[in-house]
Image (cartoon, coloured by chain):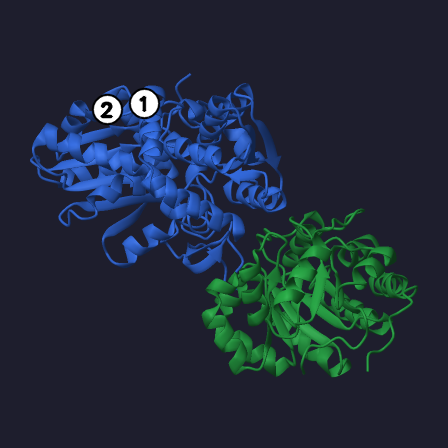
Chain colours: A blue, B green
Amino acid sequence: MAALEELEREYERAKRDQKFQKRLESLLRNYAGRPTALSFARRLTEKLGGAKIYLKREDLLHTGAHKINNCLGQALLVERMGKRRVIAETGAGQHGVATATVCALLGFECVVYMGTEDMRRQELNVFRMRLLGAEVRGVESGSRTLKDAINEAMRDWVTNVRTTHYLLGSVLGAHPYPTMVRDFHRVIGREARAQILKAEGKLPAAVIACVGGGSNAIGIFYEFIKDKKVRLIGVEAGGRGEALGEHAARFRGGLPGVLQGTFSYVLQDAAGQIALTHSVSAGLDYPSIGPEHAALRDTGRAEYVPASDAEALEATTLLARTEGIIPALESAHAVAEVIKRAPGMKKSDVVLVNVSGRGDKDIGIMRESLNLD
Amino acid sequence: MPLSFYKKPGLVVYVTCGDPDLATTRDVVLAAIEAGADVIELGVPFSDPVADGPVIQRASERALAAGTTLAQILTLAAELRQQAQSTGLVVFSYLNPILRMGMEKFCRVARHAGVDGVLVTDLPVEEAGEYLLAMKENDLAPVFLAAPTSPDERLKRIADASRGFVYAVSRTGVTGARQQLADDAEKLVRRLRRVSKSAVAVGFGISNAAQFAAVGKFADAVVVGSAIVETIEQHCGREAEAVGDFVRALVGPHPGRETRG
């Protein structure tokens, strides 16, 4: 609790500190490559024959996904707190890579926890982290995926709390993480809203994003929450079936519960044990969901739908062949939803899709599933 | 009955219920009581025991594989209460299994089973409003954890909210036996005594008679968990006997452990 309170105090101070904000903005611009492009998906729009599709290109950000927005922010806080050791959990490895990246940039020791199943399916990212100087520790317990990595990172943190900062990668965990991580990602929606107004002179009818922990989604949604006519659609991992254990769609049967310091919707059994989950995409493979998403859903401000493994893989191929963009499997879930939705929308409507990351890390999985060779 | 320590220092024994099965847990607990345990912490296995080291993690996995549930553990508690009238019984669980059962239902059933207290590992005092009400309504003692990193005002909040005793965690870290105990423990107990008159039990890492005696000098009670769970793990088929021997070895050589008035 003391560490959380210290982090909250430091974060509140940093929010009001102009120098901190300027330094963060400068790093986002001159190092990470912000602002990211907003691309009009002309051929995909034509193919689907409905709404005009725009893609927010977080795949173009340094390290290949949106994760670094949050990593840069938290890394600057680590500097302020005078800590020199940073730990993180990672699912698909993008957050791990982004953490290793900022640690190399600022000179911190870096340890990343990753489930051994995820290490196998996201090998490229394991190598990148090690090349960047991070120690990657495989986690063998439980499902050997994201939630197990978080458990191990938390165990490290409580043991080494005086010297170490836990750089949590999504809008999960105890306060202040969900708020702080969301704030560091708000730049996505701020940019996208301004960009779409410039391009089309109006707001989108809908904003679509994939939701694992929920960081890229809340990052793009947040700025639009006040625009009541804009529908906010989160896409969860529909996996390979509807039974508990076959997917990671929290709003398909999840119940309010507490996991890893957060009270939100959790996939669990009747005795309150946390369920195993499945998704072809490591980054969506998590049994709980950021509490702000739970609130948006419960108040009806946002809707959450699943996309299956098969739909995500098909969406990957379609986006690659109509727009020349290979999305991460996570982001492909959002693309899968726009494929379903756009045809039924008016041609004058605009729909915004967050491409939260690029798909290089997923080549191995795509190769197993798509018959191209 | 109220949780108190009649011997100095008291001995609190933690077991993960259902490892390898509930019948063994029952025998192990009775053996521990016979050998000198004053309070038993009935550990409820959880899928994601974030505060636990490898020993209790493994025990939890085995207990869950055997199908152990919170409901069954409360039934076991009732059975134990019949057999051990004066031993303190504390249910030690993560929050989610309790939430799934329902806070009020859990407290009612626990009370009815003769449980004395509850410790919820991942429920900080700041979030415990509903819990404290249900506990009070059912005359159950809430025990909270105090850590070496807790600032003094927080220690006071923790001590004020706790009944029976405060569980002082001896070091920053997770459960697990250690060769060396850091000085964090004694400092923490001193700080607690400055803000509260509650009894203090110290746990995490204690596994032998020398550590028991050393901690017993400044604490009202000593908690032994992983060492017991590991003893169970290593003595398949004669768990109760092994735990009885272990507990006797722990408290046996202790010179000052006479009954308090």
Q: Is residue A365 left or right of residue A222?
A: right
Left-right relation of B17 to B157: right
Mark seen at residue A37: 2
Place of residue A320 in the rendered image (x, y in percent of width and height, measured from the top left): 29, 22
- Answer with the quarter of the image where residue A211 lies: top left
The image position of residue A21, as x and y in percent, is: 32, 33
Q: Earlier in the sequence, mark 2 or mark 1?
A: 2
The chain letter for the residue carrying disc 2 is: A
Q: CA distance from mark 2 to mark 1?
A: 8 Å
Residue at 31% of width from left, 34% of height from top?
A18
Q: Tag on residue A210?
A: none
- Element assignment for label 2: loop
Provide residue A323's location: percent of width, then percent of height.
24, 21
Q: Is residue A157 above or below residue A332?
A: below
Q: Residues within 10 Å of mark 2 (few under 14, many from 20)?
A: some
Near-viewer residue (A279 or B114)? B114
- Classify A202 as above or below A253: above
Q: Which residue is mark 1?
A: A60
Residue type pointed to by label 1: Leu
A24 versus A253 height, above or below: above
Tell me whether the residue at label 2 lies in contact with that at label 1, contact meaning CB atoms closer than 8 angstroms: yes
Residue type (three-letter) at the residue carrying disc 2: Ala
